[in-house]
Amino acid sequence: MTFSLTTWNINSVRLRAESVVKFLKMEQPDVLCLQETKCTNEQFPHAAFEGLGYDHVALHGQKGYHGVAVLSKLPFEDVVRQDFCEVGDARHLSVKLKVADRAIRVHNLYVPAGGDEPDAEVNPKFGHKLQFIEEMRKMRAEGEAGVSALLCGDLNIAPYESDVWSHKQMLKIVSHTPVETSGLLTAMSEGGWTDLMRRHVPMEEKLFTWWSYRAKDWAASNRGRRLDHVWGSADLAARLSDVNVLTDARGWERPSDHVPVTASFAL
């Protein structure tokens, strides 16, 4: 059977509920992981998604900021909400699915953006981001016996040179500084994760998932970054069949500055 998972920083699920509905009707992934929902659990727009087949919903929200959600066609169990850095932010949510005869743990993450100044001494937001990445090193792809794993979300770091529009011009810009990229790649390596997007798309090809609102014509300038990621355990990496970045969604009405990324597997 085919199993598909989408990650999307929606930048306010209430403001962009129509875009989520449009996407779900078009692509129909089995699981949709949203980040930056920006609402409490009670404010989540459940009614917008009724009748679409996504009857299983897990939420970790807070008022006006952050927030992650999982919408699934498949039932899940063992919902976990981890408090990274012990500051009370809603930035993590995981569920365990049963797909055919396989158990899969799905982690949905929203890593702090880190502010504008890449110096933890003068910018506490950047220090928070580095601490968050440090704690991610404890996340293991094979952390549960007999359970496969996926880790997805807005990780707010573009780790490779081909993940940004200009490596040289971005080296001192938060999201592509050496301390961030090395930290994220260390977390991925130590955790036994495979970068599924780069497994599918050759490293020499530019690959973006985010374009700034500040650009007058985002498509023409194409100054993007790959801030959104899908990682997998080795067994799922071997079953990867496709990765699709829906770039067109950046041009939809009232778009998020991120676009959906879907990974598909032949299980």
Image (cartoon, rainbow, N blue to C red):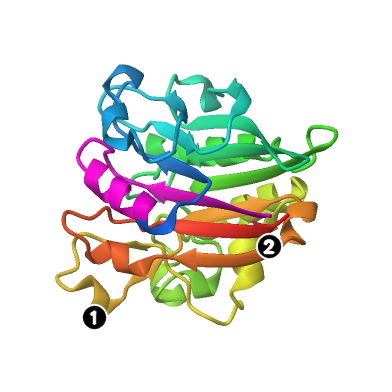
Instruction: Write down the residue under mark 1.
Output: 220
The residue lying at 53 percent from left, 41 percent from top is: 130
The residue lying at 80 percent from left, 53 percent from top is: 235
Q: Eyeballing the image, is 92 above or below 234? A: above
From the image, state whether disc 1 or disc 2 is nearer to you: 2
The residue lying at 53 percent from left, 30 percent from top is: 93
Query: Could you tell me which quadrant the N terminus lies in?
Result: bottom right
**As drawn, is 218 to the left or to the right of 101?**
left
Q: In terms of image quadrants, where is residue 241? A: bottom right
Front-most of residues 239 and 213: 239
Q: Which residues are magenta?
A: 1-25
Magenta stretch holds residue 39: no
The residue lying at 49 percent from left, 61 percent from top is: 158
Magenta stretch holds residue 10: yes
**As drawn, is 86 to the left or to the right of 89?**
right
Q: Position of residue 155 (x, y in %)?
A: 49, 48
Q: Position of residue 236 (x, y in %)?
A: 73, 54
Q: In terms of image quadrants, where is residue 105? A: top right
Q: Eyeballing the image, is 150 above or below 44? A: below
Q: Position of residue 129 (x, y in %)?
A: 48, 40
Instruction: Write down the residue under mark 2.
Output: 240
Q: Eyeballing the image, is 66 above or below 224? A: above
Amino acid carrying mark 1 in the image: Ala
Q: Indicate the secondary structure of the residue bearing disc 1.
A: helix
**As drawn, is 158 to the left or to the right of 151?**
left
Q: Position of residue 104 (x, y in %)?
A: 70, 39
Marks 1/2: CA distance?
31 Å
Q: Indicate the secondary structure of the residue bearing disc 2.
A: strand
Amino acid carrying mark 2 in the image: Leu
